[in-house]
Image (cartoon, helix red, strand yellow):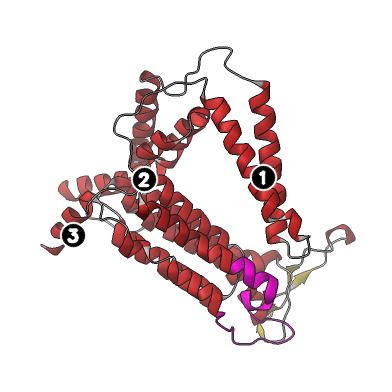
Amino acid sequence: MTRHLHPVAWWCWAIGLAAAVSMTTNPLLLALALAVITLVVLARRDASPWARAFRLYAVLGAIIVAVRMVLHLAVGLKFGTIRLLPLPQAQLPSWAAGIQLGGTVYLEGLLGAALEGARLGTMIIAVGAANALASPKRLLKAFPAALHEIGAALVVAVTVAPQLAASVQRVSRARQLRGDGGSGIRAVRRIAMPVLQDTLDRSLLLAAAMDGRGYGRRSPGSGSRLTAGVMVLGLIGACVGSYGLLDTTTPAAMGLPVLLLGAVLCLAGLYLGGRSLPRSIYRRDPWAAPEWLTIACGALPLAAMIVTARRDPAALGMPLVPRLGIPALPLLPAAGLLMAALPAVVTPVPPLASVRGTREGE
């Protein structure tokens, strides 16, 4: 079967993976999550401009790791026993006791900083995978009517990175046709301004087109205090429930039950707010078994991480203190991450993916 998977399913899958990755600094689990995300993107992306933006998110993830290590060298708190680089240390006043400017760099501290950056970078890459797999314009149709204004703003925002990737290709192709084959820093300076201008122009054209079609407009007097109150209570319940799930010291009653109650209240608020904004949708995206399987595959790693965090939290990190050791591969989170790779097989093939594969094979 050839069709686009529902964009909400891709975003739920990516958010589940990002939440699971946020709970670990184990390099084996981070590498496995990165491999799973890359596999699914390569197998199920199409030839659209936003599909080519995944490489930008990968580069951003690598930059985050490098910046985190540089910050550790400059102002990070040094710890460990294996010395790497003896740097001079500046004396700071007592009110800056938690900041260490310079100082001897140890292998354990540098690895810890790199793993913290790798965790954040993998989360960014997971979000980039959702942006590469799900069309932002099709995602706008799936937004609840109560969040239509927010959805319109998000669509304009998330199209900047895909348009940036497409603009880079257009400008580079134009330079090659003009015989300008330079590279290096000078080439970046000549490409940067045309790329930024083209990207902003296309995003503004999209915003103008959406405004011309009435996106984000609401009839006056459609607000409701009941809707606002229900939404606020639902968001508070979702926050408290999420904290209860992630914090292993809180009572079990503050975790999943409160989270489910908050989710129900949020859905009720969306329903109440959507009644005041009637709209029609042309060709709704189907929701079938592949969408449910994709969401389940994204939720399994998060559930596995939560269970492991309660039973053996040390398995989700790398042994750095009191002595550096080899990280172990916990089986339950690893199995959950492997299950997250199933959308590369169980989801339908996008219509343009076969065309892209044919062109690449020629």
Q: Position of residue 77 (x, y in %)?
A: 74, 70
Q: Position of residue 305 (x, y in %)?
A: 59, 68
Please name whichever residue, 50 or 135, is drawn nearer the observer in this view of the structure.
Answer: 135
Residue 316 magenta-highlighted: yes
Question: Mark 1 highlights which residue?
Answer: 261
- The amino acid marked with disc number 1 is Leu
Highlighted magenta segment, given as a residue range: 305-330
Look at the picture and state if 75 lies above or below 29: above
Q: Position of residue 72 (x, y in %)?
A: 66, 68
Look at the picture and state if 91 lies above or below 79: above
Please name whichever residue, 78 or 283, is drawn nearer the observer in this view of the structure.
Answer: 283
Residue positioned 47% across, 19% down in the render: 217
Look at the picture and state if 261 lies above or below 126: above
Residue positioned 41% across, 58% down in the render: 293
Question: Mark 3 highlights which residue?
Answer: 357
- The amino acid marked with disc number 3 is Gly
Residue positioned 40% across, 66% down in the render: 341
Question: Mark 2 highlights which residue?
Answer: 287
Does residue 65 appear in this view? no
